[in-house]
Each structure stands twice: as structure tokens, then as C-alpha cells.
Amino acid sequence: MKKKIETILTFMFLVFFSIGTLYPVLNILSVSLKTDNAFHSQSLALIQIREKFEDINNNNKWDEGEIFFDKNDNGIWDAGSGLRSYFNLFKDTDFLLWSRNSIIISLLVTMTGVVFASIGGYALSRFKFKGREFGMIALLTTQMFPATMLLLPFFILLSYLGLINSYLGLIIIYSSTALPFCIWQMKGYYDTIPPALEESARLDGCTQLQAFYKIILPLSSPALVITALFSFMASWSEYVVAAIILQDPKLYTLPLGLKSFQASLSTQWGLYAAGAVVVSIPVTILFISLSKYLVSGLTMGSVKE
Amino acid sequence: MSKVILKNISKSYGSNEILKNINLDIYDSEFLVLVGPSGCGKSTTLRLIAGLESPDDGEIIINNSIVNNMDPSKRDIAMVFQNYALYPQMTVKENMGFGLKIRKYKKEEIDTRVIETAKTLKIDNLLDRKPKALSGGQRQRVALGRAIVRKPKVFLFDEPLSNLDAKLRQEMRVEIKRLYKLLNTTMIYVTHDQTEAMTMGSRIVVMNNGKIEQVDSPENTYLKPKSIFSSSFIGAPKINLINGELYKEESEWYFHSNEIKLQIKSTHYQYSNFKAGKVTFGIRAEDINANLKINEDKDQINLIKGSVDFIENLGSEMNLHIKMLDNNFIIKCERKLQVRENQEVQMCFDVDQGHFFNFKTGKILC
């Protein structure tokens, strides 16, 4: 009996949070399928069916007094769900250009993250050198500052370097904010790999570098995947820094591009939502396909001997 | 020909002195066992020879060339680690062939060598498995195979059997000994287990606190220990140690410690070195006989009464723990002896087999 209540409570808890998580996502999906003027619709239906409407009062007004325009002049209400926003997204906007920008930046940040974190983490895990402790603490300290606080110094630094409005500037900032975490992450993983493995490899004839990339690196793939994912995500969905650094619309990344649908007077909610859905697809696929590594990477220490 | 010489080797980590001026000649094709308690520096010595650490001071010489600054990969040494250190992502075959592959051997050559070695170790049916799918004993064999396949100049073993259960350990002990006979290469073996040291080594190096206590054959280490430490570390049960006094009475030497008074015959191997004064007397459990009949004859020498505190039954024999007023003894006796706990027994000391150590330095009197 007690167990039953426990199960029920557990499920209630899970359902509650599932709703909390899923509702916004479904809502975005729903909006992306609706037309702009249906955004304020009170209906809870995710997909709306095209309905004929009749202007009973013949005054082009909703009951509440809001004016309604029958744009197509066919007596059919435009609010039926459809993929129109998605077509418009690719046809009428620079969405593809922003995607390209985002992909280039994210991939470069990921590469830098993986390369530097794998090497830096290794050094911190295996070698004793002067400044090691200090370096590790310093890396950790950088994680304590909120990104917004660093905006101004970053901006000043980049403007000195003449890197405002350039990919390179953005890549430097993204990498430098993602790297500390990634280095710690990799260091933590290397710590679980017995040093005897490299020692054995070195006696087998490997140089220190060979032992690292032939033995240790392949073993660290779960951690590398997480590092890659983290770096990718950090740059893929970042808005604030990009908004400061990139001013030329041709250089916009996806989050910036999406935001540009939001104007002061009218916002194209359909496009906005459709864009949001498309942007989240690659990340979702990445997460699902890498979830195997995520689990094994986060439950470290499984690599004994 | 693979001689290894350690000359005045010192090594410390921070303020912690691990090795203090170690001098050791390791002969060609010998099975040398470094034995000692944990932290005595035996593993460090091994790692210095392998090149995984470098000495603060002194020289390491392999085959007449100083290798202090030579990378481990160039030393042509193979090492078997305590945790086997098999590469988890590789199959048994790849694990064994890795060293050859790195040294750019041809694939066919690698294959023949790996298969040949696998056959000698009876692991040829496991070649396609990953280490994860192997039992402890099998992993140990693979680790051995990986070392052997390269035919290195010197083999190093760092407590290779300590992760195995008792039965398997005994099996692998024989196996390694067999391999040694087969390969006849210099092998240096580190262990904290005195049984392994006694049974495997052609010579034993007893180490304590970063220093070498004794380098000798197993027989000599056991029968002629050079120090209290060496005598108590080698042999089970532990040697009985009694602090007391040596003195001369009517041209006879005696050892005295409270209730114990032993007469020493002139046949004792240290007889000529005796000097009156404080000493530590060491006598092994098998050199004291327990008699159930108490002999009250005053003329009998070296007979002492004591009561049995408890009995350790080992199957083939028994260890009696004897309690006296100031001293406790362990005596080995045969299992047929009808003895009970708290029973009075008479101990007969075979003093000729005992050892007298300097009380202060712990070194043998000489």
C-alpha cells in the first residue's frame, strides 16, 4: 500500500514537471504552424482546422469589437494551421545565411574546445608543474562571473584587436568562456584513467605524445563527446554576446536572426516560432544520438584498467 | 646480455626521501626479487629502471651504458603492472601486438609472434576478446604475454599477483617461474609478499625505508639474516625476537632475558663475534621444540616452561602461541602433538640456529 502511494506520488511529480517542460515546446510548435493573427487565439488546440467564418454582423468586426480583415476576401478564416511559416522562413528571410554563420562558428568553437580541453586537461591531470594549482583555481574562478558582466571588457578587448563585427572575435569569446569548464571536465575524466596505461604504452615504445593520442584519447571519447556538445551548445544558442559583437545582419547567427523578426511594432510570431523549432532540431538530434555517451561520460570511473 | 647496475641512486618526492643511496648489481639472466613493506622504495626502484621516474642522484646502467636520460620507449624493457594496465579499447591480440606495431614490425611478423606467445600462455582462444571480458587470471596472462612478445632485454614485474586470489596467485607464481626458465632473461620482480620472494627469486633484495637491508639467495636470507628487519620480514610465522643480555660465565656464553636463560655452544656461527652487552636474540618458530612432558632435570640446558595461549592450526602443522611473563613466542609443531590451550609446555631452544643482533643498530653481530 505504502509502495503504491509512493509510486503514485512519484508519477504525479513526474507528470507535473513533464507538463512544465513540454508545454512551452508544444506551444512554440503550435504557434509555428498557425498564422500570425492566430497567435492570440484562446484555443488550446495545437493544430487548428481551417474554419469558415461568417461575419454575422456584417461589420468586419469580432464580437469583442476587434476589427477583422478578410485579407483573401474568400470568407475563410486564415487561422488554419499549415507549414506556411516554414516556407516563408526559408524563402523570404536570411535564415539559411544565419544557419551557415551559426554552423561555421559553432563548429570552430567546438573544434577549439575539444583540441584545447583535451590537451589542457591532460596536462593538468598528469603533470606536476609550477602554477598548476593556481591555474586550475583560476580557470574555475572565471566560471563564477556571469557572461553579461564580462561583456564590456570583452567588447573593449575585441575593439582593441579590431575584431568587432567578425567571426573570429565571437569564436574567441565563445571558446574562452566554454574552455574552463571543458578543461575541468576532461581533467576529471583523465583522472579516472590509471596512469599505468600510458606508462605501459611508453614501455611498449610510445613517446609521451603517442601514448596520449593512441591510448588515452580513444579511451576518453565519452568525455570528448560531452566537451564537444557543451562547446557546440554554448555557441549555437548564445544571444547576448553575439548581439554586442555582430552588427552586420549578414554576419548574424541564428539567435540574432530570430530576434530580428521581433520588431518594435509588429512581431512575426509565426516565423519566429518556426525559426525556433528549426534551430532546436539539430541540437535535439545531437543530444539524442549522443545520450549514450552522455550517460557513460557523466558516470565516470567506468574505465578502470 | 642484460646487466642492470644501480649506482648511488637517491630519489625524493619533496621532503620525502624514498631511496637513500641505493647500490645494486643485477646480473645477466637472474630473477631478482625486491621485497619489503609498502613505502620501502621497491616500486620506485623498479620505476627508475623502467625510466618512468628519474633519479635525483646516481646512475642507472643497463648493459654498460648510462640510461639516466633515456626515454622509457628506448630502453627495451617490458613491465607488468599490478593492475595489468591492458588497453581497454583493444582486443587481446591488439594489446599484445601493440609494442611491435609501434616499433613498426611487419603485420605477419606481429601475428606469428602474438600467436606463438599466446600459445605458450594458453590464451590463444582469447585473442579476439577485450580485456573487459576476461577474468583476473586471464588478464594477468595477457599482461605477461604483452611483455614477452617483444622479447625485451629486461622484464620488470610490479606486484603482478597482488590482485589475484590466493589459489590463482600460486598458479601464476609457478607460471612466471616457468616462463623465466623458458626465456632465461633478466627479470626484476617487486613484491611485498615474502612467500613470493622466497619461492621465485634467484636472489632477494630486502628493502626497508629506502635502504637495502640485505641482498642474498633465498636460503641465505632466511638462514643468515643480516638484520632484525630482514629476519622478521622473511619467514612465516614471524621470527621470535627477544631483547636481553649476552654475558660470559665460567668460560661459557649465556643469553639472559628475565625468565629465559640460554646457554650458547661454541658451535654457534657467531660465537667468535660475541661481546658482553645488550643484544636482540632471534629464533625461528621451527627452531623451538615444544614438549608436553615437563622435564625437571636441572642439568638440561635451554629448556623453558611456558603456557599455550592459543593454537593456529594450519592443517599440515600448528603454530603454538606461548605466553610467558615477559616474552611471547610462536612455535611451529607437528599437527600430531596433542596440545590444548592453556596447557603448560616445555620449550627446547635450538640456540645454534638462532641469531644475535646488535641491540642498537639491529644489524647482525659480526
Image (spheres, rainbow, N blue to C red):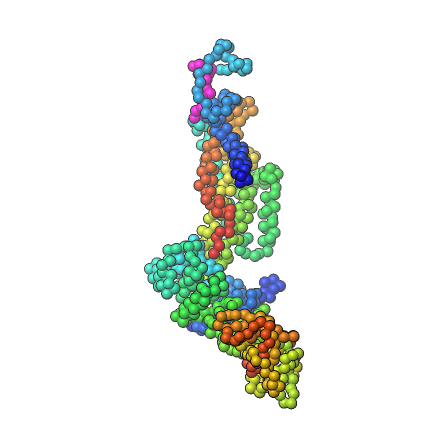
Whole-percent x, y for residue A106 in the image: 49, 39
- Give the residues in magenta: A70-85
Q: Quadrant of residue B130?
A: bottom left
Instruction: Name, please, the residue furthest toward the bottom.
Output: B250
Residue B233 on the magenta segment: no
Q: Nearer the viewer, residue B313 or A129?
A: B313
Q: As drawn, is A295 to the left or to the right of A141?
A: left
Q: Residue at x 49, y 51 (%)?
A: A302
Q: Is residue A20 above or below residue B36?
A: above
Q: Residue at x 47, y 33 (%)?
A: A279
Q: Is residue B346 above or below residue A130?
A: below
Q: Is residue A154 above or below residue B5?
A: above
The N terminus of chain B, quarter of image: bottom left
Q: Nearer the viewer, residue A189 or B177?
A: B177
Q: Residue at x 59, y 47 (%)?
A: A140
Q: Nearer the viewer, residue B281 or B203?
A: B281
The answer to whether one can see residue B110 in this image is: no
Q: Residue at x 46, y 15 (%)?
A: A53
Whole-percent x, y for residue A275 in the image: 48, 30
Q: Nearer the viewer, residue B98 or B222?
A: B222
Whole-percent x, y for residue B46 in the image: 51, 66
The C terminus of chain B, quarter of image: bottom right
Residue A81 on the magenta segment: yes
The answer to whether one can see residue A129 in this image is: yes
Q: As drawn, is B348 to the left or to the right of A88?
A: right
Q: Is residue A32 above or below residue A301?
A: above
Whole-percent x, y for residue A262 in the image: 53, 27
Chief SS of the magenta region: loop
